[in-house]
Amino acid sequence: MAADNISNGLVPDWRYHVDVIEGMNYRDDDVFMCAFPKAGTHWIWEITTMLLDGRPEYSPVSKVTSMLEFSTTDELDRLTSPRLFNTHLPYKLLPSDAVRKGAKIIFLQRNPKDIAVSYYSMLKQKKNAFPGNFNDWNQLFLFHPGNSYLTVYPKNWFEYTLEWEQVMRSEQRLNLHMIYYENLKQNPVEEITRLSRFLGSSTETMYISEVANKCSFRNMKKANIETKDLSRLQGEKTMFDSMFRKGEVGDWKNWFTVAQNELFDKVHSDKMRECSFLYQYTV
Ligand code: A3P
């Protein structure tokens, strides 16, 4: 499945970009946004773009234009500063020069049950992208190692998240701001103010409120249909629709059976027993 999804353009082939990323020309005001797929990357990207621009206006381009694993060196070099990169690649594949020099990193998290549902829904919107049912998907999400059938990315959700936890414990140079999707959903103005402070941007209340309003689920969905140049998605309209599917906390309850939920909780508590991250499954 993973290879099919690369060849049909559903996801980029990160393996061809590792050298580009490591050799990129880092600028002091570059910002890196990291998230596991389906954590709400488009949402935070749009908010952060507005904060860096100092104007609550939608970017005319989609976030794929600044995805590290999707871009050539020339494309990265052509972006105007301050550049906001985004990636689903794990910490170890970020440009080491940037990390060493204290680049600002935004790390977005979301509860893994909603991530699993959102990911499954995205693949189902794309014909043949995942042939199984939700139970098959749940098994893959829980048990398959990264770099395998489940995902074209090198780590599954557990591996990806545990790596960040480990890095946050041990890496003194890390200049990181962590956001939880659920907190942003509940307290957008407060969370956007925290983010803006981290970026060194304005924290003026009217301005932050306008950013929050422009980036509400309904407004962003509409704006993305009306204003974005989607040519980089190679006509994948159905895939793009799944980027703005429901935008809720707790949709997983409409998908998981009691047994699937119990299994998920058990595996999660086994694999994440040393991990300090806490997730909200309902609001
Ligand atoms: P759902 O599939 O649960 O609706 P990513 O951008 O990382 O691919 O994540 C996509 C998920 O973020 C989708 O979740 C999508 O609906 C949700 N999302 C996108 N924009 C949002 C917004 N403005 N507010 C809340 N959720 C949003």
Image (cartoon, grey):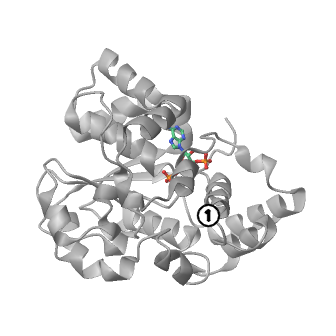
Task: Please indicate, yes or no, whether residue 44 appears anywhere in the rendered image.
Answer: yes
* Residue with the most extreme top position: 206
In front: 51, or 264? 51
Q: In the rendered image of this protein, does residue 55 appear above or below residue 200?
A: above
Q: Closest to the observer: 195 or 219? A: 219
Where does residue 2 sit, x and y in percent of width and height? 55, 80
Query: In terms of secondary structure, where does tag 1 sit?
Result: loop
Q: Is residue 147 visible to the viewer in this orientation of the structure?
A: no
Horizontal side of residue 273 vs 33, given as left or right: right
The quadrant in which residue 120 appears is bottom right
Residue 282: percent from the left, percent from the top? Answer: 70, 40
* Image coordinates for residue 50, horizontal then vertical, percent: 29, 35
The residue labelled by disc 1 is 126
Q: Would residue 67 be found to the left or right of residue 137 on screen?
A: left
Judge left or right: residue 167 versus residue 248.
Answer: left
Q: Can you say which quadrant of the picture contains the C terminus?
A: top right
